[in-house]
């Protein structure tokens, strides 16, 4: 599971995502959690939108075992 969280999200506050992350850790489920500073429920900053999409792409490439066709930063999966 990949969780992309805005630090200023009033719809799904960061503490709710952190509870999910803790449950994933407890159950040994592979996951990634990225917190985007200054973002709300829908990301608005272009650099964060790009980072979120690239992180999802990296995550899925690692989970499903394919090589990304572009040079992107690898997302940490724990």
Image: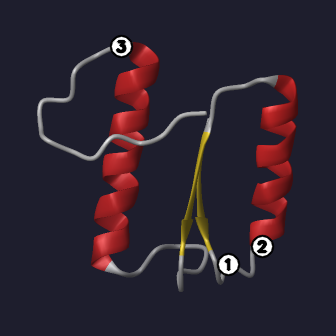
Location of mark 3 (residue): 65
Q: Quadrant of the N terminus?
A: top right
Residue positioned 29% across, 73% down in the render: 47
60 relative to 44, above or below = above
Relative image position of residue 40 (x, y in whole percent)? 59, 80
Q: Residue at x 67, y 78 (%)?
A: 9
* Horizontal side, residue 52 vs residue 36: left or right: left
**Residue 62 horizontal/vertical position (percent):** 40, 23
- Tell which tag, 2 or 3, sits nearer the viewer: 3
User: Residue 76: which disc?
Assistant: none
Q: CA gap, disc 3 to disc 1?
A: 32 Å
The quadrant in which the C terminus is found is: top right
Mark number, residue 13: 2
Q: Is disc 1 surrounded by few (<14), some (14 to 19) or many (20+) residues within 10 Å? A: some
Secondary structure under tag 2 reads loop
Across and down, in percent, residue 31 comes to: 62, 35
> Which residue position is annotated with label 1?
9
Q: Is residue 32 left or right of residue 69?
A: right
In contact (CB < 8 Å): disc 2 and disc 3:
no
CA neighbours of label 2 inside 10 A, class few (<14), some (14 to 19), many (20+): some
Q: Is residue 12 above or below residue 32?
A: below
Q: Are marks 1 and 2 in contact (CB under 8 Å)?
A: yes
Task: Residue at 20% x, 29% y: name it.
Answer: 68
Measured in 3D between alpha carbons, the distance from the residue under mark 2 to the one under mark 3, in whole angstroms, is: 32 Å
Q: Position of residue 69 (x, y in %)?
A: 12, 30
Horizontal arrangement in the rendering, residue 59 relative to residue 57 (left or right): right
* Mark earlier in primary sequence (3, 1): 1
């Amino acid at each position: 599971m990949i969780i992309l969280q805005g630090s200023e999200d009033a719809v799904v506050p960061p503490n709710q995502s952190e509870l999910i992350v803790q449950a994933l850790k407890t159950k040994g489920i592979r996951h990634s959690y990225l917190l985007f500073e200054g973002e709300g429920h829908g990301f608005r900053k272009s650099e964060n939108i790009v980072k979120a999409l690239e992180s999802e792409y990296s995550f899925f490439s690692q989970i499903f075992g394919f090589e990304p066709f572009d040079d992107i930063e690898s997302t940490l999966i724990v």
